[in-house]
Image (tube, rainbow, N blue to C red):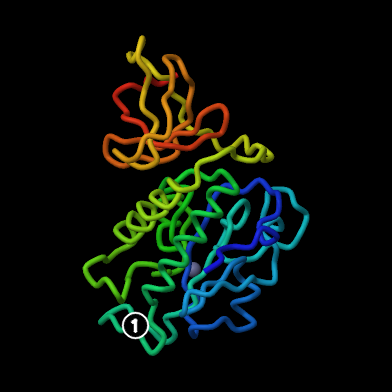
Amino acid sequence: MTGVPADWMPRAAMRRIHVHWTAGRHAPNATDQRAYHILVCGDGSLRRGNTSIEANAPGSGLRPAAHTLNANTGAIGVALCCMFRARESPFDAGPDPLTEAQWQAAIAAIAQLAHRYAIPVTPRTILTHAEVGPNLNIPQRNKWDITRLPFDPDCQGAQAVGDKLRRAVAARLDGMSGTVEDLPSDPALKLPRFRVSGVAPSRLNFRRAPDGERAGALPEGTRVERLAVVGDWWQVRTPAGYVGWVWSSYLTAV
Ligand SMILES: [Zn+2]
């Protein structure tokens, strides 16, 4: 697994990542290659779709990859190649089920994309196709990707699968702290902002994971943007672009 090659992620103002399955075989066909930017095969290997991510950026003037009804602008389409002839009820994953290797590879790729494009891990910014209707209020036609994980039958439904996806992506992002490259700003995307409050004269521990290894410390008054929430631990980005986790009690909204 080498991840998403840098040249598959051109500079662009992207707002969201939509995660699909193709309802096809474990490898993409020509239709799949047209519809999505990045495809994850049954063995976890990645294929690039025919359309570059930048074609879906707002105002690109290019023909976008049409992966989501009325919601393609600003949206990266990632598809897991699987679920050919699958049936929703009674559930039957068919001959090409979504595999655990594929799910793990997709999470790694989505974390890379989220990092590259500074997309926060929230239900409105990193979501499955099945969540587009409820979370963005943009109705889709009976899309049930991804409401089932054949390797984890206890996890069912759009919200449960979406939450599992986001927890895993947020955990992967911990290993990616560092300066975020300057990207074209998207005025539609406003991250909640906070400042460190109530720790002086000490500093607030800045960790690689919720309750994890200490990576540094933030002085009183530091302004941060919130990227993700896991219980009382928040993932934040500092003005210098460092990403890490802090205890939320010492952050005040600004
Ligand atoms: Zn879909």
254 above or below 181? above
- In x, y percent, where is residue 172? 43, 52
Mark 1: secondary structure: loop
Q: Ligand 1: does it lie within 8 Å of the C-beta at label 1?
A: no
Q: Is residue 109 above or below residue 40?
A: above
- The residue positioned 43% from the left and 17% from the top of the image is 219
Which residue: 36% across, 87% down? Answer: 94
Quarter of the rendering occupied by the C terminus: top left
Residue behind mark 1 = 93
Q: How many numbered badges does the structure rendering display?
A: 1
- Expressed as whole percent of the image width and height from the top left, the position of residue 47 reads 60, 73
Q: Position of residue 142 (x, y in %)?
A: 41, 70
Quadrant in the rendering for residue 7: bottom right
Residue 56 picture quarter: bottom right
Up the image or down, 203 lies above or below 15; here it is above
Query: In percent of the image, x 63 and y 53: which residue is there?
Result: 73
Name, please, the residue furthest toward the top: 201
Q: Which one is in front, 204 or 20?
A: 204
The answer to which of 12 and 173 lies nearer the viewer is 173
Type of the residue with mark 1:
Ala
* Residue at image point 38% right, 50% down: 171
> Farthest right residue?
61
x, y (%) of residue 193? 47, 26
Q: Left or right? Give the position of 38 relative to 210.
A: right
**Would you call the spot at circle 1 few (<14 residues within 10 Å), some (14-19), or many (20 or more)?**
some
Considering every residue shown, the one lying at the far left of the view is 154
Closer to the camera in the image, 181 or 148: 181
